[in-house]
Amino acid sequence: MTQDRRRSRAKPPQPPLVAFDFDGTITTRDSFTAFLRWRAGPVRYALGLLRLLPGVIGYLFHRDRGRIKAQAVAEFLRGVPREDLEADAVRVRVLHVAPVAEPSIGCREPSAIST
């Protein structure tokens, strides 16, 4: 009888899990810099890297990945509305991350996306 009660208490459907991987645990390549490069475009990305040069030199001494990433986010994403950033994150996942995702992850593409 106890087993029958457990079966009747089925869990409601759970929303899908969405994961963003910027440290290489899901993808086989760095998706953080790929996202910034894709979003900024080649000229803006090159100029941004030049402006990040002092931070890159500092990284050689302090080795704080969080600090250099925060500087990169400030350089390339400051002022970007959250909605735009979220939409771009989905686009870059489909275009760039899914092809390099670890096969065991089973990265699925949304059925409708504008590129």
Image (cartoon, rainbow, N blue to C red):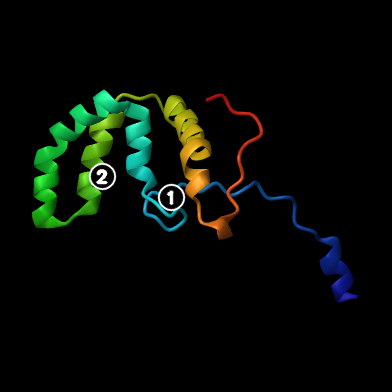
Q: What residue type is labelled 1?
A: Asp
Question: Mark 2 — residue?
Answer: 69
Q: Is mark 2 on a helix, strand or loop?
A: helix
Cα–Cα gap, marks 2 and 1:
14 Å
Question: Mark 1 — residue?
Answer: 21
Q: Which residue is drawn at 23% across and 52% down?
A: 65
| Left or right for 12, reference 72 | right
Question: What numbered label is drawn on residue 40?
Answer: none
Q: Do the residues labelled 2 and 1 touch (CB within 8 Å)?
A: no
Q: Which residue is drawn at 39% across and 51% down?
A: 29
Q: Position of residue 78 (x, y in %)?
A: 28, 28
Q: Position of residue 19 (x, y in %)?
A: 50, 49
Check disc 2: other Cα within 10 Å, few if <14, some if 14-19, many if 20+. some
Q: Where is residue 92 in the image (x, y as percent from the top left)?
A: 46, 35
Q: Which of 74 and 45 is in front in this view?
A: 45
| Left or right for 62, reference 36 | left
Give the image quarter of residue 62. bottom left
Q: Is residue 8 above or below residue 44?
A: below
Q: Nearer the viewer, residue 70 or 27?
A: 27
Q: Count all numbered tags in the image, as a single digit.
A: 2
| Left or right for 7, reference 105 | right
Q: Is mark 1 on a helix, strand or loop?
A: loop
Q: Which of 54 and 1 is in front in this view?
A: 54
Q: Which amino acid does label 2 sit on?
A: Lys
Q: Is residue 88 above or below residue 8?
A: above
Q: In this view, does 108 lie above or below 85?
A: below
Check disc 1: other Cα within 10 Å, few if <14, some if 14-19, many if 20+. some
Q: Residue at x 31, y 30 (%)?
A: 77
If you read the primary sequence from the N terminus, does the residue marked by circle 2 or circle 1 appear first?
A: 1
Question: In which quadrant will I find the N terminus?
Answer: bottom right
Q: Position of residue 107 (x, y in %)?
A: 58, 49
